[in-house]
Amino acid sequence: MKIFVDTAEIDEIKEANSWGILDGVTTNPSLIKKAVEKRENIDVEEYVKDICKTVDGPVSLEVIGLTREEMVEQGELLYEKFNPVNGNVVVKIPINTNSPESSVGEYEGLKALKDLSSRGIPTNTTLIMKPEQALLAAKAGTQYVSPFAGRIDDYIRTRVGLTRGDDYPKSAYHDADWLRHASYLNLKSRYDELEGEELEKIYSDKAVAEVKDSISDDGIYSGSSAVSAINRIFSNYEFDTAVLAASLRNSRQVREVAEAGADVATIPFQVLEEMIGHYKTERGIVSFSEDVVEEYEAIFE
Ligand code: G3P
């Protein structure tokens, strides 16, 4: 699995690069905003060029337009401006740019993907929240799909009444197995009440249906299970499109998307830091250091 860092903070990119584990960078308008707000009088074009120089691997840069024409024009511009710097710019296109705030139609992203891919410009399809979207993006010729694992988990937690910030921190792991088990136990008493009645009664029980519905988003129980489903679909049909797990919030989630077979995980810097430490590793190194005998030390002299 390749590791990208999900940041526009150049010091973080440099640091992760120095660890020898970095294969690329992903940015988006929100990450660029954070970097801009930290600096005065920043020349963003130069800044983005510096990002491209820092890493020997793909750098994803996102368009800001919502229509096919805007996105294609901006994608070409990003590619023209920044690809010469490291030869590895990937244009990020949202899968669907339609919203109540901006009714542009639901297919602008797909059309832009097709246009850019026919012009040889590599794309990373962003804001993927379900496998069906990934399948369409792959058909349109994208190089990467970015399922937003953390936001999928947020959405499922919203459905069971949990709000990020109030009920759990952004970094909290979403334990989909636990949620399913708890829901099962909760419903079990209802099954017991139904004892002796036909199985269909359970299927037609509204409360059962509501609980079943709330713990998943149309059958997707977690962000990492979405990554796994996309990976299986791509394998079934031998798509070349890479699965780039994004919106990762904690190291356990990184483990899950790696288990799910993601080709790439784009990881925020603080989550990368979280991946390295373990209490027993720390205790282990202390005890190895204490146990060094002079005779062994001598061979290093
Ligand atoms: O790569 C996408 C990512 O930057 C979004 O992350 O944590 O804001 O959902 P998040």
Image (tube, rainbow, N blue to C red):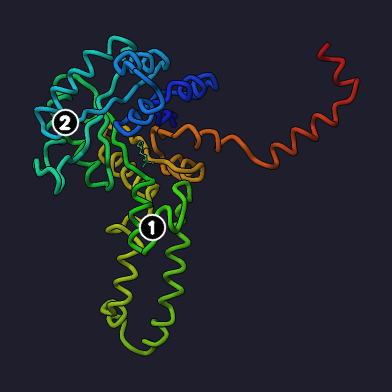
- Seen as rendered, the residue at the extreme bottom is 196
Which of the 4 quarters of the picture holds residue 3? top left
Q: As drawn, is 21 to the left or to the right of 225? A: right
What is the number of the mark on residue 101?
Answer: none
Note whether residue 240 is visible.
no
Pointer 2 residue Cβ closer than 8 Å to ligand 1: no
- Residue drawn at x 55%, y 38% is 274
Q: Which residue is mark 1?
A: 163
Quarter occupied by residue 89? top left
Q: Which residue is mark 2?
A: 65
Between marks 1 and 2, how big is the CA–CA gap?
Answer: 30 Å
Residue 145 visible: yes
Q: Residue at x 22, y 32 (%)?
A: 93
Residue at position x 29%, y 72% in the image: 209
What amino acid is at disc 1?
Thr
Q: Position of residue 236 (x, y in %)?
A: 28, 42
In the rendered image, residue 88, in percent from the top left (x then y), is placed at 32, 17
Examine the rendered structure and indicate whether residue 31 appears above or below residue 118: below
Please rate how many residues cluster around mark 2, counting C-alpha atoms within 10 Å: few if below 14, some from 14 to 19, many from 20: some
* In-image side of 202 versus 299 (left or right): left
Q: Earlier in the sequence, mark 1 or mark 2?
A: 2
Residue lying farthest right?
294
The foreground one among 53 and 207 is 53
Residue type marked 2: Gly
